[in-house]
Image (tube, rainbow, N blue to C red):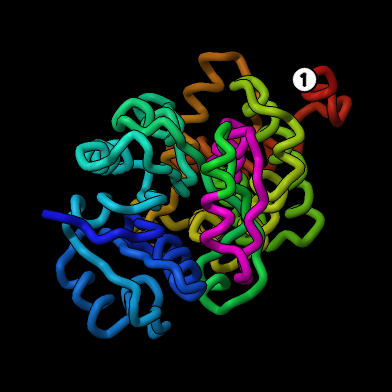
Amino acid sequence: MTAMTTDLCIVGGGSFGSALAMIAAAQGHRVRMWVRREQQANEINQAHTNGAYLGEARLPDHLQATTDMQLAVQGATVVLMAIPSKSFREVARTVGEHLRGDQLLVHATKGIEAATFARMSQILREETCALKIGVLSGPNLAAELMQGHPSGSVIASPYDEVVHGVQALFSHSHLRVYGGRDVVGVEVGGAFKNIIAIAAGVADGLGFGDNARSLVITRGLSEMAWLGTHLGADVFTFGGLAGIGDLVATCNSKLSRNHRVGERLALGKDLDTILRELKFTAEGVPTTDAVHRRAAAAGLHLPICQAVYSVLFDGKNATGAFGELMRLPVGDELSTLRYR
């Protein structure tokens, strides 16, 4: 089978992948999406909607979808994966069967592989022949992207070709894509902010105000940076779009799935019920488990992450967990980062 040349292949038919596909296609780029279900592909191709994820929002008529991975990937200048972390390796392996080494491979997944603590770029290197790999992340709530609201993101890669290639796809749109080099920092920021969003949701669900949410965000940022620098990230990355930018958006927005998880935990709902009612992936749940185990093994002190873990997996009452955080000893605010 010979695939038609496209500027962008989006692997994944969820809300964020669909929003990115729509923006690029609206700029006149040739875009094809890979989705799992034939019914979804037909809806995108014929009705130009993706109702399960985007409601009645209309997609550009020339945006195409397919369930054939070979057709989707071959001939694409940029391949962008927007797949949940739990199935990321499986799909990456399939992508790798059809990818050439000269294609640009980027992911937009804000999670960590639970079993291995591998970041998504590490999985791409393990499962594909791609040489030029990058990560796209930032405060990008899909519903707002679809509505055309101004937004910012960062594409991080050691390769200029990846940075410039992704920037070109979204130039002249309402999504401003900045360049960066710190792949580790951008991936850690995108994943860790989901843990803090759960904590912020708990604070809101308990009826606390803006002061409490600001406390969670700023102390959560410190924990994010502490973990990131431990893994080799540049601490300054966490002051940018993939760090504080994404953290603020996710912790303050009712559109955030992870924030909703925290709110419902505070109301006393059990996790299984919350995830069943949510229907879509909340990356903060498996990320909390993965980070908790890594922090314990490395001796890292991440009290908010520990508190979220205790509520999610140890059955601790949300009020009690938040109260324990407020009773922790206080010290120098920036002591963990001062010499990083």
> Left or right: 38 with respect to 246?
left
The amino acid on which the numbered mark 1 sits, given as a three-letter code, is: Arg
**Residue 160: x and y, percent?**
59, 39
> Left or right: 271 with respect to 222?
left
> Left or right: 9 with respect to 338?
left
**Residue 305: x and y, percent?**
59, 35
Residue lying at 73% horizontally and 46% vertically, measured from the top left: 240
Q: Residue furthest right?
A: 332
Q: Is 146 located above or below residue 81 in the figure?
A: below
Residue lying at 42% horizontally and 28% vertically, measured from the top left: 122
Residue 43, image quadrant: bottom left
Q: Is 96 located above or below residue 59 in the figure?
A: above
Q: Is residue 98 visible?
A: yes
Q: Residue furthest left?
A: 1
Residue lying at 53% horizontally and 18% vertically, measured from the top left: 296
Q: Which residues are magenta?
A: 165-193
**Residue 202: x and y, percent?**
60, 54
Q: In the image shown, does 71 or 142 lie closer to the viewer?
A: 71
Check the picture and name the quadrant holding the C terminus: top right
284 is within the stretch colored magenta: no
**Residue 29: x and y, percent?**
44, 68
Residue 209, image quadrant: bottom right
Q: Is residue 307 visible?
A: no
Q: In the image shown, does 22 or 171 lie closer to the viewer?
A: 171
Residue lying at 51% horizontally and 36% vertically, measured from the top left: 309
Judging by the rendered image, the residue that carries numbered circle 1 is 340
Q: Residues within 10 Å of mark 1 (few under 14, many from 20)?
A: few
Tell me the SS state at disc 1: loop
Q: In the image shown, does 114 or 81 lie closer to the viewer?
A: 81
167 is within the stretch colored magenta: yes
Q: Is 262 located above or below residue 64 in the figure?
A: above
